[in-house]
């Protein structure tokens, strides 16, 4: 699993313009509770964001068997205190017919966090598939930015 993240996922993150959260070139791959994780930041091109802003990306890998690995890749696209479920349903409706889904989560300050992402079962030779999906996710999230700025100005 660590090899999948190191050899396939991290190069795909770099290729899609995703950087390490602290701006370094080396992504840290960590093991927690039997899952391997790597995080990154998709830099935001939106007006009003400073250079250090962007959307956090979370990648986790878990072994299915000796050949296959389950990847879960999510980008945090917004936060909301109010009306979270209705807004999540609206955003998930916009993603209907794509490979992506909307998930919710909580931040340390108990804000509800919107995550857009996908789950993918891969093998060691699925480099092209991983590259395509990460790029598609980056593009979908950047296109959704206008929606969240209109419907969730508090984000």
Image (cartoon, rainbow, N blue to C red):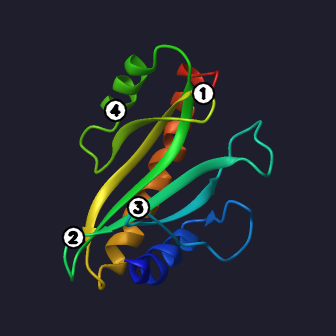
Q: Earlier in the sequence, mark 4 or mark 2?
A: 2
The relative height of residue 134 versus residue 118 in the rendered view (above or below) is: below
Question: Could you tell me how far apart the alpha carbons at marks 1 and 4 are, in whole angstroms?
Answer: 16 Å
- Left or right of 126? Residue 20 is right
Res 126 → quadrant? bottom left
Point out the frontmost of discs 4 and 3. Answer: 3
| Circle 1 residue | 149
Q: Earlier in the sequence, mark 4 or mark 3?
A: 3
Q: Which mark is residue 12?
A: none
Q: Residue 22, position in %: x, y?
A: 74, 62
| Circle 3 residue | 33
The relative height of residue 70 versus residue 52 in the rendered view (above or below) is: below
Q: Residue 32, position in %: x, y?
A: 46, 63
Point out the frontmost of discs 2 and 3. Answer: 3
Residues at circles 2 and 3 in contact by the CB criterion of under 8 Å: no
Density class for disc 3 (Cα within 10 Å; few <14, some 14-19, many ≥20) is few
Res 111 → quadrant? top right
| Circle 2 residue | 64
Q: Residue 101, position in %: x, y?
A: 33, 42
- Residue lying furthest front: 33
Question: Could you tell me how far apart the alpha carbons at marks 4 and 2 are, in whole angstroms?
Answer: 27 Å
Point out the frontmost of discs 1 and 4. Answer: 4
Q: Secondary structure at mark 3?
A: loop
The relative height of residue 37 versus residue 82 in the rendered view (above or below) is: below
Question: Could you tell me how far apart the alpha carbons at marks 4 and 3 are, in whole angstroms?
Answer: 29 Å
The one nearer the camera, 14 or 34, is 34
Residues at circles 1 and 4 in contact by the CB criterion of under 8 Å: no
Point out the frontmost of discs 2 and 1. Answer: 2
Residue drawn at the location 73% of the way across and 71% of the way down:
24
Query: What quarter of the picture does the N terminus occupy?
Result: bottom left
């Amino acid at each position: 699993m660590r090899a999948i993240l190191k050899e396939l996922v991290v190069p795909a993150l770099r290729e899609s313009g995703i950087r390490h959260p602290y701006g370094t070139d080396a992504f840290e791959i960590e093991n927690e509770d039997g899952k391997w994780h790597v995080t990154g930041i998709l830099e935001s091109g939106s007006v009003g964001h400073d250079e250090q802003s962007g959307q956090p990306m979370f990648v986790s890998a878990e072994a299915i068997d000796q050949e296959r690995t389950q990847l879960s890749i999510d980008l945090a696209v917004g936060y909301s205190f109010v009306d979270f479920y209705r807004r999540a349903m609206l955003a998930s409706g916009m993603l209907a017919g794509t490979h992506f889904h909307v998930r919710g989560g909580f931040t340390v300050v108990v804000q509800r966090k919107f995550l857009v992402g996908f789950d993918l079962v891969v093998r060691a030779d699925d480099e092209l598939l991983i590259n395509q999906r990460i790029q598609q996710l980056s593009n979908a999230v950047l296109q959704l930015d206008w929606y969240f700025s209109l419907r969730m100005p508090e984000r």
